[in-house]
Image (cartoon, rainbow, N blue to C red):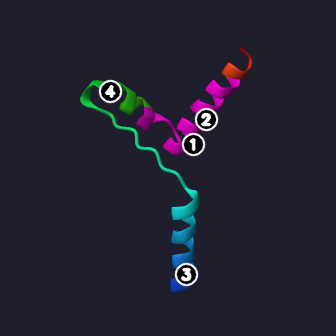
Amino acid sequence: MAQTEAQRRAALKYVRKSVTQKVVKFYPADAELLAWLESRPGSQNAYLKGLIRADMEARRED
């Protein structure tokens, strides 16, 4: 079922209020890093969050 205009506006309002975006830039010198990220199966977002969570967990033990 298609979203109504009110539902679309509400969803956009929620995203503007609650979601934070961070941009990662890959320069030509980082080509190997970008290729690695793109070769990972699944969501790149989930992969990066997983790396951050693993680092957080490792540092809690220090």
Q: Residue at x 49, y 35 (%)?
A: 40
Q: Given the current orientation, which residue lies at the most extreme top position? A: 62
Query: 54 or 41: nearer the eye?
Result: 54
Q: Which residue is identified by label 1?
A: 46
Horizontal side, residue 56 vs residue 26: left or right: right
Q: Which residue is identified by label 2?
A: 50
> Residue 37's x, y, as percent?
44, 34
Query: 5 or 17: nearer the eye?
Result: 17
Res 4 seen here: no
Residue 61, by quadrant, is top right
**Span shown in magenta:** 37-57
- Residue 54 is one of the magenta-drawn residues: yes
Of the numbered discs 1 and 3, the one sitting upstream in the chain is 3
Question: Hey, what amino acid is under mark 4?
Answer: Asp
Horizontal side, residue 18 vs residue 37: left or right: right
Q: Which residue is identified by label 3?
A: 3
Q: Which residue is identified by label 4?
A: 30
Instruction: Look at the numbered disc 2 and give the secondary structure of its residue.
Output: helix
Residue 7, by quadrant, is bottom right
